[in-house]
Amino acid sequence: MSSEVLGTARARSPWPVILTVCLGAFVGQVDASIVQLALPALEKSFDVRLDAVSWVAIAYSLAFASALPVFARLAEMGGRKKLYVSGFALFGLFSAACGLATSLGWLIGFRALQGASGAMLGANSVVILVTAAGAALRGRAMGVFSTAQAIGICVGPVIGGLILGSLTWPWIFWVTVPVAAVATVLGWKLVPPDEAPRRRAEFDVLGAVLLVPCLAAFLLAITELQTWSPPVIAALVLAVVVLGIAFVVRERRTPAPLLNLELFRSRAFSGGIVAVLLSYAMLYGIFFVMSFVLVRGYGDSPLTAGLHLVVILLALGIVAPFAGGWAESRPRAVMLTGMSLCFVALVPLRLALTGDPTTMPVVLLALAAYGAGLGCFIAPNNTATLQAAPPQRAGQAGGLLNLLRAFGTATGIAVMSAVLTAAIAAELGHPAGTHQVPPSVLLEGARTSLLLLAGFAVLAAVAATLRDRPARVPGRSGA
C-alpha cells in the first residue's frame, strides 16, 4: 500500500479494520469446532457410515489448504481487499447452502466451497491486519487476533451443543450467515483500498491444478484404507505420483512457485513443518473421536458433550501463553515436555473410556492434560519453524505453515475416522455407523484409535527437535 493510503487509514483509526479482521477469525474458528460436534447428528440424519460423514469436516480443511497458496498468490498479483470481502460474502452464501443440502454429497460439496472461501479470508487476514495496525500497534493487534481465534474455537462446541439440543442440524451452518453478511459490509466499508500492482506477476497455474487432486487423493486413500479396494490403491498411487513427481518437479522448475520447496533444505524447518501437521492432527483427531465417544458412548446431550470438549481447548489456551515465555530460553525442552504430557495423558484416557459415568472425572482430567500438552507444543514449534527459515523467505514459510496446519486438521480427522471405522468393522465383522453399534463396540474402537495419537506424539517430538547441520568452516575437515 502507498504511504498516502496508509496515512488515511490510520487517521481514521486502525481499530475498526483490526476488529473486522478479528471477526473473520472468530467466525472461522467457530465453524471449525461447531461442525465437529455435529458429526454424530449428521451421521444419524443421513444414515451413513463414519468414514463418509467425516468428509463434512475433511472437505472444508482440504479445500482451505489447497486454495490457500492459490489465493495468497492471487492477492499479491491483484490486491487483497476484493478477495477478502468476496471471501466473507461467499462464506456466508455457502454456509446457507450447507444448511439447505438435501443429501450428504451436496453437503460435502458445499463444505468444500465454504473451505475455499475461507481460504480467501485466511490468505489475506494477517497482512491486512498488520498493515492497518502499523509497527506501533502490531503486537496488540496480533494479540487481539489470537484472542478472537481462541474464543471462537472455545465457544464453538457450546454454541453447537445449544443448537443441536434445541434446533435441527442445518442451524449449525445458518448461525454464521448473518455474521458473514455483517462482516462483508464492514470489510467493504472499512478495509483500505489496495495499491495498484506495480508489475504483472506470474501465476503457477499448473502447480495449482496439481496441488488439489494430490491432496484430495491422499486423504481419500487414508479414509478408505480399511477397504484396500482398487479405487483406494489407485488414489494412493495418484497421490504419491502427483505429489512425489509431477508437483515437486513443477515447483522446482517454475520461477514463481506456489510453494517454495527450497525451504525444505533446512532440517529444522522440515522437521518443524512435519510437527505442525502432526500437532494439528492430534488436536482435531482427539476432538473427532471424543465427539462420538461422548454422544454415543456416554450418552451425553449435545450441550454436555460440547462443554466436555471445551476442556481440551481451555487447557490449551491457558497453557499456551506461558509456554511461549518458557520456550524463549529452552524451546526444545518445552516442546518435548508438551508431547510427553500428551503421550502420558492418553494412558488414563484409554483406561477410563468404559462408558460408566463415574469415570468422567478421569476422562476430563486426561483431556485437560492432553490439551495442556498441545499448549506447550504448538506455539513454540510454530515459532521455531518460522525462525528456521531464511528471513527473506519468512512470508513463504508462514504460508506453508498455514497450509500444513489446515492439512494437518484434515489428516487428523481422516486418519481417526479410518481407524475408528476399521476397529468397529473388526469387532462386528462388517462396517457400520456409530449409531448402529453398541456403545461398548464404539468405545473399544476409540481406545484403539488413541494408540495412533500416541504414535503421533512420539513422531512430533522427534520431528520438532531436528537441528540443521552446522556450517563447515573453510579449510577444516569434518573429522
Image (spheres, rainbow, N blue to C red):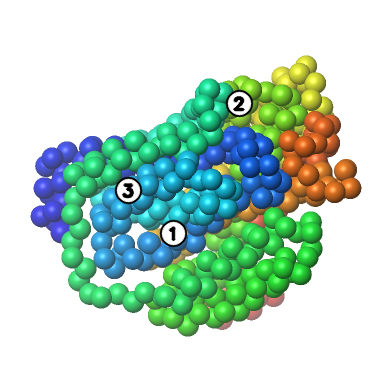
Residue shown at 67% from the left, 37% from the top: 44
Report the side of 479 relative to 428 (left or right): left
Q: Earlier in the sequence, mark 2 or mark 3?
A: 3
Indicate whether 447 appears above or below 9: above
Q: Secondary structure at mark 2?
A: helix
Quadrant into which the N terminus falls: bottom left
Residue shown at 72% from the left, 19% from the top: 361
Quadrant into which the C terminus falls: bottom right
Indicate whether 306 appears above or below 381: above
Q: Is residue 189 visible?
A: yes
Mark 3: amino acid: Ala
Q: Earlier in the sequence, mark 2 or mark 1?
A: 1
Quadrant assignment, res 45: top right
Kindly identify which numbered label has been placed on residue 89.
Answer: 3
Report which residue position mark 2 lands on: 302
Q: Is residue 365 visible?
A: no
Report which residue position mark 1 lands on: 68
Indicate whether 300 appears above or below 89: above
Mark 2: amino acid: Pro
Mark 2 closeness class: few <14, some 14–19, many ≥20 residues within 10 Å: many
Q: CA distance from mark 3 to mark 1?
A: 17 Å
Where is residue 291 shown, x and y percent of the image? 65, 34
Where is residue 138 shown, x and y percent of the image? 30, 43
Mark 1: amino acid: Leu
Mark 2–mark 1 CB contact (< 8 Å):
no
Q: CA distance from mark 2 to mark 1?
A: 32 Å
Report the side of 230 relative to 96 (left or right): right
Q: Earlier in the sequence, mark 3 or mark 1?
A: 1
Where is residue 436 shown, x and y percent of the image? 77, 37
Where is residue 84 shown, x and y percent of the image? 31, 52
